[in-house]
Image (cartoon, rainbow, N blue to C red):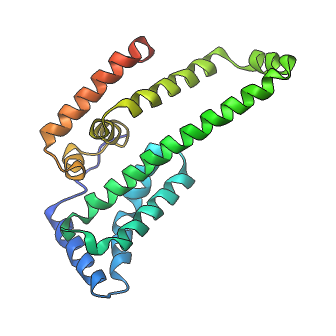
Amino acid sequence: MTQPDRPLFTDDTGTRDAAWVRAALSGDPDAFGRLVSAYQRVAVSTAYRLLGNSEDAAETAQEAFLRAYRALDRLKDPARFGPWLLRAVTNLALNARRSRRRTTVALDEERGTEDAADTRGASAVTSMTPDREAEGHELQQALDAALEALPEKQRMALILFTIEGWAQKDIAELLECSVETVKWNVFQARKKLRDRLGDMIAD
């Protein structure tokens, strides 16, 4: 994915968002809707890149907006509404990934028990599964586990920069750190993935 043509978070967007946040807190019924309209697309897109499912992404974005609305009066700096919201989207999506993976593992265990009761059925299924598909599944599981093992900021920096294509400046805003720290986090995350996965991934 190509990187955005312009940063997501600028002084202008911060000033705009702060005005809308204050208006929403003052009782303007349309103000929060303007914030939703401004960030709906990037919120859903970010969630989708982390979850790979459009329905889950839409639900995650909706939950993030709902939480933001409920906690709007606790936002210390209204100009940072964008990074604040997208941090919630990212955290919710990562939590959903963890939950989904646990569910998948549980289902796989149940399926394994059922297969053990029918050896011929298990053999038939195995014979119909291409080696490449099995290898791809194994790699995905290993990659998910490796990503999960990364420190949170390294994982988020890597996913947002490499997969979502965010500008480093925007990631720095989201993680509340410097651009150099973002670069360091991405570098360290890639190094740890290479060290853990070895020959399973290309350099």
Numbered-mark total? 0
Query: Where in the figure is residue 106, as x and y percent of width and height?
Result: 64, 35
Examine the rendering and report whether any part of residue 191 can be seen: yes
On screen, residue 113 above or below 18? above
Is residue 203 something that shows in the picture?
Answer: no
Relative vertical location of residue 140 with respect to residue 44 in this rendering, above or below = above
Image quadrant holding the C terminus, namely top left
For residue 79, side relative to residue 157 (left or right): left
Q: Nearer the viewer, residue 51 or 7?
A: 51
Residue at the extreme bottom of the image, as rendered = 27
Q: Residue at x 35, y 38 (%)?
A: 159
Can you tell which quarter of the image residue 198 is in?
top left
Residue drawn at (17%, 71%) of the image: 15
Residue sitting at x 44%, y 44% = 50
Residue 190 position within the rendered picture, expressed as x and y whole percent measured from the top left: 30, 26
- Residue shown at the point (62%, 20%) measured from the top left: 134
* Residue 138 in picture, x, y percent from top left: 55, 21
Instruction: Examine the rendered structure and indicate whether residue 98 appears above or below residue 70.
Output: above
Residue in the foreground of this view, choosing between 92 and 19: 92
Q: Quadrant of the N terminus?
A: top left
Residue extending furthest toward the top = 199
**Left or right of residue 123, residue 136 in this image:** left
